């Protein structure tokens, strides 16, 4: 656990570093896939910047809405402060910004969603490493399991052994990113993003049972209610694709958007 590191006398927050690395990793995946599809690799930077800007705005607005009583006391100061972000708000804001970019580029289609799925999963996995390193309070409830750990030096410290839920999420979403990447040439359009919604939502829904968040309805947390939307959306989407011709791409690895040949290296 290392909330801060010093580089040549400059103190850097490890959460911020991993947040940035998450975008770098996602950008690398996008660039590789765009090259495979015969599209400009530079589009990956445009997508990342659009997602970053929209994500920050969405995450901040979501936090303000969820904490209106506190935020309304100094709304302007809260908007421009350095704290207060909600992941799902960031996901929505980032998605909207990328959709606007795609419309501008004329690429607003289901292929954009499939393109983004592995990158989203990888970025999330890397970001959770930042939660683990900083000990920012995203850990779970007390446990006596052998891998339980305390966060005495975290930004939200605890000396009690708890579930290291950021590690759970990094492993789960990292595995999902690898699976989605492996599937990219073998399934029909829409399947990758539907699987991301289903599995990503299920992962967050389950981990919330051992996290410290308060329940808001029917014994579920806000994140679980939002995750249910992802799960249902992904499951319904997969059923519809399956009924319309199956999940696998009959053309297999030969399929490419616009018929572009596959590039062997990144």
Image (cartoon, rainbow, N blue to C red):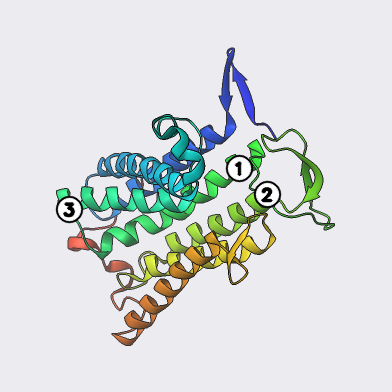
Mark 1 lies on residue: 131
For label 2, the residue is 139
Mark 2 neighbour density, 10 Å: few (under 14) some (14–19) many (20 or more)? many
Q: Is residue 231 above or below residue 31?
A: below
How far across and down, in percent of the image, does residue 12 sit?
A: 56, 24
Using the image as rendered, state which of residue 61 and residue 175 is in the foreground: 61
**Helix, strand or loop for disc 2:** loop
Closer to the chain start, of discs 3 and 2, is 3
Which residue corresponds to the image point at 22% horizontal and 45% vertical from the top-left? Answer: 40
Total numbered circles: 3
Identify the element where label 3 is drawn.
helix
The reply, left or right, for residue 68 in relation to residue 52 is right
Query: Whole-percent x and y of residue 242?
Result: 35, 83
Which image quarter is the N terminus in? Answer: top right
Q: Residue at x 33, y 72 (%)?
A: 252
- Quick check: marks 1 and 2 in contact, CB under 8 Å? yes
Cα–Cα gap, marks 1 and 2: 8 Å
Indicate the secondary structure of the residue bearing disc 1: helix
Residue at label 3?
103
């Amino acid at each position: 656990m290392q909330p801060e590191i010093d580089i040549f006398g400059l103190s850097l927050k490890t959460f911020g570093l991993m947040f940035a690395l998450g975008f770098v990793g996602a950008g690398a995946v996008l660039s590789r896939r765009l090259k495979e599809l015969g599209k400009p690799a530079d589009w990956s930077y445009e997508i990342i910047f659009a997602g970053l800007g929209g994500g920050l705005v969405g995450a901040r607005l979501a936090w303000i809405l969820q904490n209106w009583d506190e935020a309304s006391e100094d709304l302007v100061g809260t908007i421009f402060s350095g704290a207060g972000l909600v992941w799902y708000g960031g996901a929505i804001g980032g998605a909207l910004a990328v959709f606007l970019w795609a419309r501008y580029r004329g690429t607003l289609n289901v292929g954009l969603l499939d393109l983004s799925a592995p990158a989203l999963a990888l970025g999330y996995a890397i970001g959770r490493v930042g939660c683990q390193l900083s000990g920012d309070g995203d850990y779970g409830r007390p446990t006596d399991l052998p891998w339980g750990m305390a966060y005495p030096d975290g930004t939200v410290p605890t000396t009690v052994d708890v579930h290291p839920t950021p590690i759970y999420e990094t492993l789960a979403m990292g595995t999902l990113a690898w699976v989605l990447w492996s599937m990219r040439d073998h399934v029909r359009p829409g399947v990758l993003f539907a699987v991301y919604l289903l599995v990503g939502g299920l992962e967050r829904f389950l981990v919330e049972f051992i996290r410290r968040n308060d329940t808001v309805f029917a014994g579920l947390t806000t994140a679980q209610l939002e995750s249910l939307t992802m799960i249902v959306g992904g499951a319904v989407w997969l059923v519809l694709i399956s009924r319309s011709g199956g999940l696998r791409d009959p053309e297999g690895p030969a399929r490419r958007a616009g018929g572009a040949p596959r590039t062997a290296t990144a």
